[in-house]
Amino acid sequence: MSRAAMSVLQSPSPAPALRAEPALQPAPSAFGVPCGAGAGVAGTELGPAAARLAGLAAALERLDLPFRDDGDLMPATIAPDPVRAALGRHAEPVAGWIRAVHDQAMAVLQRNECPIMLGGDHALSMGSVSAAARHAAEEGRRLILLWIDAHADFNTPETSPSGNLHGMSLQFLAGHPELQRLLPGRSFPAVRMEDVHLVGARSLDRREREAVAEAGIRCHDMRAIDEFGICAHLRRILAGLDPARTHLHVSFDLDVVDPALAPGVGTPVAGGLSYREAHLLMEMLHESGLVRSVDFVELNPMLDHAGQTARLLVDLAASLFGKTISLRRNDTA
């Protein structure tokens, strides 16, 4: 199926306006994951430090939030597994990081706080989203996953052209049996692919496009966003979701933003979200009151320009947790 055809399938229909006042949102609690082993370019291991230096804590504290930063994780120690080691590049160290992320995200969720995972490469979402799926099941909630990314990350060890595990994260979360070895000793319900929304995609090879369509992932690619606007797509995604029964996980890969605005990523793709599209996305997500866990991944300060991408991450996080341009009234469209 072509990307254009996928776009037509996901053409948005009118949806009710979002409420102007957000539901009570859990307090944010960040932790850093200084790992780049799942990526093909060095530098994402410096991402958490760059986000902090760019002023993440100050930006969230200015919103009068009870923000906490739990510091950087260390990878868990896991017994060697030759089968796991063959799954992709650096699979053994990545597995240790995934276990650490999973356990930390679960601990934060059990405190009734909103974990913010500061990556690090996108392979680490295997840990954060698996924890969100596990916690949502325990709470009787439906997990909705927004995968905001230029890429689908839906390769397998057999189809991946690079062997980089950050390109296999969604397959792991879908329950791919071999990839489950990356999280030994921790069970979680596989994420329903029809509850996954891929937003901003623009770099999928033919086999991956076919796999995404066959799995039932909702693909809101850049062609569709160009045609109908980010607002229409997000309204359609959020319409009808009940805050009391929904756990919305936002996995935000900074390469979804156009590289002219976010140069500090390892796999840039031209033609991404604009500054205002990215902020509108975050502002609407805050207004929905649905967000319960968040990833910000693939910040690579070695490729950044004077901290430009790190500052963008901070600004987007502030929008996600309530920073607005002006006070919004209930009758504001």
Image (cartoon, rainbow, N blue to C red):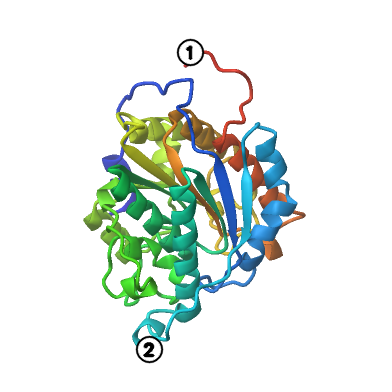
Determine which residue is flagged by label 1: 330
At horizontal 49% and vertical 67% (from top left) the residue drawn is 100
- Extreme residue toward the left, this view: 214
> Helix or strand or loop: what does disc 2 sit on?
helix
Image coordinates of residue 287 in percent, x first then y, are 48, 28
In percent of the image, x 50 and y 59: which residue is there? Answer: 104
In the image, 125 versus 27, the foreground residue is 27
Residue drawn at x 62%, y 67% is 45
Mark 2: which amino acid?
Pro
Q: Nearer the viewer, residue 95 or 327?
A: 95
Q: Residues within 10 Å of mark 2 (few under 14, many from 20)?
A: few
Q: Is residue 61 above or below residue 24?
A: below
Residue at 46% in and 43% down: 112
In primary-sequence order, the first of circles 1 and 2 is 2
Residue at the right extreme of this rendering:
306
Q: CA distance from mark 1 to mark 2?
A: 58 Å
The secondary element bearing badge 1 is classed as loop
Mark 1 is surrounded, within 10 Å at the Cα level, by few (under 14), some (14 to 19) or many (20 or more) other residues, namely few
Mark yes or no: residue 218 visible.
no
Give the residue type that dot 1 points to. Asn
State the quadrant of the N terminus.
Answer: bottom left
User: Can residue 215 be spotted in the picture?
Assistant: yes
- State the mark number for residue 82: 2
- Dots 1, 2 in contact, CB < 8 A: no
Q: Is residue 119 toward the left or the right of residue 182 in the image?
A: right
Q: Which mark is residue 194?
A: none
Q: Position of residue 246 (x, y in %)?
A: 33, 38
